Structure formats: C-alpha cells, structure tokens
Image: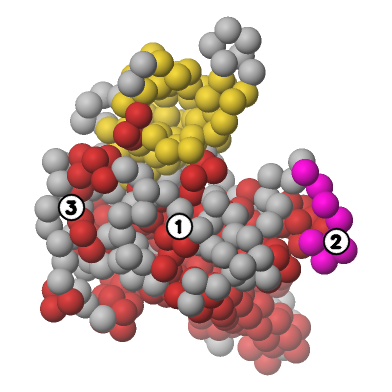
Amino acid sequence: MTRANDRSIPTPEELVKRARELVPNLIERAGRCEDERRVPAESVEEMKAAGLYKILQPRRFGGYEMDLGVYIDIAYELGRGCCSTAWVYENNAFHNLLVSYFSEQAQRELWVERSVDTSVSTGWAPREGFAVKVEGGYVVNGQWGAASGAYNCAADLLQVPVVDPDQGAFIEMRLFLLFRDADEYEILDTWHASGLKGTGSHDIKVAEQFIPAHRTIAWSDVNRQPTENEVFLQGAGVHDSAWYYVPALDWMHWTITPALAGAAWTAIEASVERYQTRTNLFQQRLADTQSVQLRLADAAARVEHSILSVKNDVAECSKFANARQTPPRLTRARWRRNSAFQAIMLNEAMSSLRYRDGFNGNFLHQTLQRAHRDIAAGAAHVGTDWDLMGGTYGRTLLGVEDPSDPLAV
C-alpha cells in the first residue's frame, strides 16, 4: 500500500498552478486530439505526473483525498487548453471517488496490485446491458456507450441493471469494476461525433463475464439519502473524506460544466483578439461595433456566472458534509438546477458569439467554433438536462411528491 502523507501532498494552489502550466501544451495538441479522437498519451502522462488524477483518490492508496472544489478548479484550467482533454480528465478523475466507495479489496486490486496511477473509464448508458447474480458474484453481458477516455484507461466502471434470470425483471442497479488487462471488456470504436471529438467516448462490450461480488456495489449504497437529522456514510466507508457522506447523485452533476466553462473563456479571449483587427464589409473595426461589445459582455457574464455558481454550490455542499449536517431538500435540488442552468448559459454564450463571428467562424482552425461544438455536446449530458434537473427543483419547490422521479431529493 502506498499511503500519501501530508508532506508529499501538494497544496491546492500548487495543483491549480500545475494545471495552468499544461494549458499551452493542450492548446497545441487540441487539433491532434480531435483528429485522433482520443486524448494524446503525452497529455495524460503530463496530467498524471502533475498529480491531477490523485485529487479525489484516497490517501490510503496514494492519493490526495482533497475537496471536490480543487477538482473543479483543475477541470476549469484544463478546459482553457482543450475541452476534450478536460472532459476526459473530469470523467476519469471523479471515478476515483466512486471506486473509493467499493470494498477495500477492489481498491487494492486497482491501486496496489496494478498501479497507484491506474485510471478508470466508465459506461453509464447500457445498450441492452444487464447482469445476473450467481454464486460468488455476477455475470455481466451487454454494451455500454459514452466511455470517455476508454483507450487511456486500464479499468472501466459500468452501471448495470441486475435482472431476474428467469423473468428478466429488473431487481436493482449496481456499479461494476472491470479490468482491461484481464480482458474483461472490449472497447468498440464507435465515437464519431461533432463535438467533444477528442474524448474517445467509445462503447464498451462485455460478454458472459463473471465479476466477483467484491468488485460491485449497489447504486443505492452510494446514494444513501439523508434524513431530516442525519447524513449517512456512502459505500464501504474505509476512508476519511467528508465527501463519502454525500450521495453520488448530489455531486456527479458538478463533473460536467467546469471543463466547458474553461473552453468558453478561452473562446472569449480568442474572440477579443480577433475583433481587435477584423473589419466588416463596411470597413468598421468589429471591436468598435456595439453588437460585438454587447455580445462579448453577455457571453463573459454567462461564463463567469457559470463557474462561480458551481464553485459556490460545491463549497456550500462541502460545508454541510464536513459538519455532518443534512442539507435542506430544496438546497440539494437547487444544486442540480444550477448545474443544468450553467450548461444552458455556456451554450447560449457560445451560440451568440458564433452567430456574430459570421462566415469566417466556419473554419475549423478557429477556437470559437471548436468551443461551440464541444460545449453543445457537453451541455446535452443527462447530468445537466434542464428538463430533468429543473423538474426536480420545481417539484421540490412546490412540495409535489413524484415516486417515479429518479432524481428525487
């Protein structure tokens, strides 16, 4: 076991600085990242060497076990360099927190028997995927989509419905940890997308694969809902972080917009630089036109509000978690609502600037068009679905109970 001690753990400020220093390299590789439809290996190695993947990894297994707010800051900085790279970082790095809910044996197999730097991809969208309980574990079959960073990872975390083998009836949802070096899954090259092209969010295929019971955990065991006077430990509870008292559904929606906000801000900076020298058909310098000035002001306000909103909500949640206090139901619903609204604001900011960019904005070398595509793709994530998150908040605000709401707080 490799336990990190206080002296070996960098400060949050140092980690953010390291992420910021990687931005020029990420910008340089952004086109290649899209062309190859995966994050370049050297970018992943640089992020790992900087310790960025260890932020949510438990100290007991060589990580830093830090606050989620540090992860948010890192993802934002990386997004300023390459949105696809930052998206994969967000996705793979937060899985360290999910894996930390699992049994100690599963964590040892991942971070001790393999490597302290082993990263984990995922599969959240089952395409006819299912598991059947057998003696000592489960047999898994099926195909899952959206495994961001699949080719950059040595393990995969699947969300799998467990069914009755005779009647096919749904029993429960569980998370399963699978290892690539054990040939427990296959990566199918399916990611041909208009946005977030470089994330390599391919499909995962599993065929008649036995997974031992210690490498699976019930979705309900990582989403123990707080009562009026008590919060509950999530998962196996073998680590110290306050974030193990936060239901996964209360924080997973915060793993989407930080990277998008970083990309949006870089697009604004690139637009400002271009408008200084470009003229329109009437030989007016674009920077002198009111329409450009107003659209830039509007876009900047939306992006700044987006990142400040997520940081404020994470800090509020952290305060509740560290005090082992129960957040009010409306507060938890507000956090989800805000994440969805952040995605809307970011998407609208880029759409507005892209409209003003005119014909010249169509060229693939332009920073804005890439951010526009990436943010539109990221904003479509179920974790920032306004119809879902807004509906949950509206029902909570109105006191309407809906037993069928999968996101009910």
Whether 85 is among the magenta residues is no
Disc 1 marks a residue whose amino acid type is Leu
Quadrant that contains the C terminus: bottom right
**Relative image position of residue 247 (x, y in whole percent):** 53, 56
* Residue at image mark 3: 116
Whether 398 is among the magenta residues is yes
Q: Which mark is residue 256?
A: none
- Compared across the picture, whether 353 is left or right of 203 comes to right
Is residue 9 in view? yes
Callout 2: helix, strand or loop?
A: loop
Q: Which mark is residue 233?
A: 1
Residue at left offset 42%, top offset 38%: 217
Q: Which mark is residue 399?
A: 2
- Mark 3, mark 1: which one is toward the viewer? 1
**Stretch of the chain drawn in magenta:** 396-403
- Compared across the picture, whether 237 is left or right of 124 comes to left
- Mark 1, mark 2: which one is toward the viewer? 1
Of marks 1 and 2, which one's residue comes earlier in the chain? 1
Classify 45 as above or below 24: above
Classify 330 as above or below 225: below
| Alpha carbons under labels 1 and 2: distance apart | 27 Å
Q: Are marks 1 and 2 in contact (CB under 8 Å)?
A: no
- Compared across the picture, whether 63 is left or right of 146 comes to left
Callout 1: helix, strand or loop?
A: loop
The quadrant where residue 72 appears:
bottom left
